[in-house]
Amino acid sequence: MPNFIFITGGVVSSLGKGLASAALGAILQSRGYTVRLRKLDPYLNVDPGTMSPTQHGEVFVTDDGAETDLDLGHYERFTGVAARKTDNVTSGQIYSDVIAKERKGDYLGATIQVIPHVTNAIKDFIVSDLGKEDFVLCEIGGTVGDIESLPFLEAIRQLGNELGKQNTCFLHLTLVPFIAAAGELKTKPTQHSVKELQSVGIRPDIVLCRTEATIPDEQRNKIALFCNIPQNAVIEALDAESIYDVPLAYHKTGLDSVICDHFGLKPREPKLKIWHEITSAIKNPEGQVKIAVVGKYTSLIDSYKSLAEALVHGGIANNTKVDLTWIDSSELLNDESLKAKFENIHGILVPGGFGERGSEGKILAIKFAREHKIPFLGICFGMQMAVIEAARNVALILNAGSTEFGQCSSPVVGLLTEWIKDDNIIKRSSEDDLGGSMRLGAYECHLSSGSLVESIYNKGIIFERHRHRYEVNIEYKEDLQNIGLQFSGMSPDGILPEIVEYNNHPWFIGVQFHPELKSKPFDPHPLFSGFIGAAFKYSRLV
Ligand code: GLN
């Protein structure tokens, strides 16, 4: 049985529990331990796939096709361990499984209750599908005190008893705010939060305190005293300049040593070279580029979490600082507004998206990138809009559009009704449920020899993650290739266009998949390294 670390949060939301879990995973790995990270989300949606990105942030897709919480993206980026379907569950999923079992009569006439049926289902999930991992880090979404979290807290409390103290550790993340009027850091919210946790029977072993200033010994002692833990288990999590500073910062505070002590593990020398290299590359860039991201969920930057990080990784690969300008595509109305917005921009990126609103602005931005030979990367919806732009403005198929926006006489992008997954034919229709019905997860893609993408990936077959319902219509392949837009990546059966690129533009690539989901600071995705490299070259020309 692995060692379980349960991570809860208190005081306020948005403290960065996901990031804290991910960074903790990374420092445990640096000591040679294997880790697995999981997230339990208390909300009632079965998965976040149907949630608005501006409310809940990005939907992170795993190789095995699950639509999961964006924290799983942090986990993957910090540890390199590919997240799986079995690493994220919601109350909605738990309840729908329990109710399905009840309907089948599996409970043999019992009265179905939160304790034990729901809590048992949660515990089964936590210990299921594990291999030989040394540590399983299990984050509970939400904030202690939320009604929805109670079954999850009860489940981990029970597991703590069942598996024993030597196999479980409870880490509670809180906020120690600086109150300007008093001129000091305040520990009371942390005391209250721990009290709340104790009221459901969980005594934290470690309290991780987010703070903007160093916590003086006096306050640290106070937290230790009131929370009933040793002083060295009160760990300071000082605000960091970059999220990639966090693993080193945690190590400095002794968090990994406290955890190893807790589990009775002999200390192993940590290997932190990679994190030193990453932070040093971010702090000492040799160049700088400005990238415009033209999307419609720009009001919440978390909607594009993996994308923003992948661009940083592209910067690391090129020793370049990447400045992002977020542009709401609905504000792009004509050539004049484009010129103003794209002044001093060295690369344009149109990310994934859904629905017609803002699509014309994206098409205008793509036209601008094509005509001015500005490096361009279109992702998923961004590729679909690039193909529509090419069809309308270059191939002169004037009614070119996507059936996502309604009936269309030239459906250059159309509903994907049939595709192959692991030798099985998957079928979809416009009547299907919205949840979980897209083409999801990793698919193989074959790259044309001699193409720009082949040189970027330096191989002929790639696997990338998808999340889409529409697809570029292969019927228009010839018309589009004739005007220079090459279909340089295709599904193995040659039916689904996965990548397009212009052969008369220095760097213009559209991809049907989401490369940002696989990028890591220690292994930047080649498309992002290539894009930032091209933007840097362009910045030298203008
Ligand atoms: N809305 C488009 C589709 O479903 C693109 C999706 C996306 O960008 N992820 O095909």
Image (cartoon, helix red, strand yellow):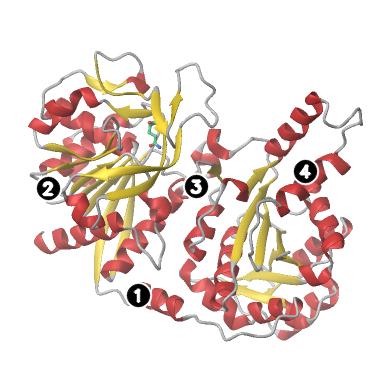
Instruction: Give me the C-alpha separation between circle 2 and circle 4.
Output: 55 Å
At 23% from the left and 58% from the top, the residue drawn is: 458
To which quarter of the image does residue 337 belong?
top left
At label 2, counting other C-alpha atoms closer than 10 Å, the crowd grade (few under 14, some 14-19, many 20 or more) is some
At label 1, counting other C-alpha atoms closer than 10 Å, the crowd grade (few under 14, some 14-19, many 20 or more) is some
Quadrant of picture, ligand 1: top left
Q: Which residue is mark 1?
A: 281
Q: Position of residue 199 (x, y in %)?
A: 88, 57
Q: Nearer the viewer, mark 3 or mark 2?
A: 3
Q: Which residue is mark 4?
A: 121
Three-letter code, disc 1: Ala
At label 3, counting other C-alpha atoms closer than 10 Å, the crowd grade (few under 14, some 14-19, many 20 or more) is many
Q: State left or right for residue 92 relative to residue 458.
A: right
At 54% from the left and 73% from the top, the residue drawn is: 247
Q: Position of residue 105 (x, y in %)?
A: 83, 26
Q: Earlier in the sequence, mark 4 or mark 1?
A: 4
Q: Earlier in the sequence, mark 1 or mark 2?
A: 1
Q: Which residue is mark 2?
A: 373
What is the total number of numbered labels drawn onto the structure image? Answer: 4
Q: Nearer the viewer, mark 2 or mark 4?
A: 4
Instruction: Give me the C-alpha separation between circle 1 and circle 2.
Output: 29 Å
Q: Nearer the viewer, mark 3 or mark 1?
A: 3
Q: Is ligand 1 within 8 Å of the beta carbon of the residue shown at mark 2?
A: no
At 69% from the left and 64% from the top, the residue drawn is: 173
Instruction: Give me the C-alpha separation between circle 4 and circle 1.
Output: 44 Å
Q: Nearer the viewer, mark 4 or mark 1?
A: 4
In the rendered image, the vertical position of residue 9 relative to residue 97, given as above or below? below
